[in-house]
Amino acid sequence: MAVPFSNEEFLGVFLTYNQAIQPVQIIAYVLGILALFWIWTGTVYHIVFFTAVNKAAYLIGVLFIAQGLSLLYVGFKSSFDFQIRPAFSAIAGILFVAYAIGIYPLLNYAFGHAYPVMPVFGITPCPVTIFIFGILLWANERVPWFLIVIPFLWSIVGISAAISLGIIEDYGLVVAGFVGSILILNKGYRKAI
């Protein structure tokens, strides 16, 4: 079956489209990946697995899924732009991302929580929460307040468990939660003035 357009015309639409919507592609990837992390963690980690030891994980799982859906909503409805600039908030963002991806697993090993008995980046709550604060600190636009509520609340819940259970690597969670929230809200406040 023949199509009513040529290969060049077909690819030309992608050229025009992608140039017109830049940098939405990057934003979609970043927010889509973050959304997937939150939805996966809420569904699989909290609801499927963690409810075996704590029934509150049903509620927490739903909140994580809501966070993921909120990220998708913002990704489709806004013109978010991310950029690492020479500013304290961007440097804090780099540190949080590095902590979530690299330092956190190293600390797990250092404190005797070797794989598979360790939280893994992207699919468990604490590294995902630290990571989102880092990414949101790179936003050029004002971050909607609802995108930081659940991560902030999790940083409080997570640190209480970290202290009770002696999970020292999760202490970075409370730092990311408080420092990240303050910096994100401060950036938004300054843009609103």
Image (cartoon, helix red, strand yellow):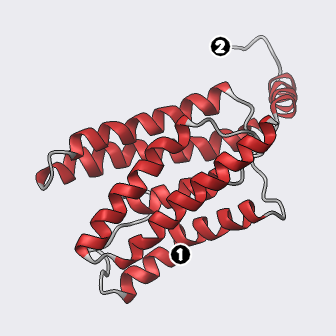
Q: In x, y percent, where is residue 92?
A: 67, 66
Residue 168's quadrant in the figure? bottom left
Disc 2: which residue:
1
Q: How many marks?
A: 2
For this rendering, which residue is in front, 37 or 80? Answer: 80
Q: Residue furthest front?
A: 193
> Would residue 123 be visible to someone looking at this image?
no
Q: In x, y percent, where is residue 98?
A: 59, 71
Disc 1: which residue:
102
Q: Say whether disc 1 or disc 2 marks the residue closer to the N-terminus.
A: 2
Q: Secondary structure at mark 1?
A: helix
The amino acid pointed to by label 2 is Met
Q: Secondary structure at mark 2?
A: loop
The amino acid pointed to by label 1 is Gly
The residue lying at 53 percent from left, 75 percent from top is 102
The residue lying at 66 percent from left, 40 percent from top is 143
Mark 1, Cα crowd under 10 Å, few <14 / some 14-19 / many 20+, is few
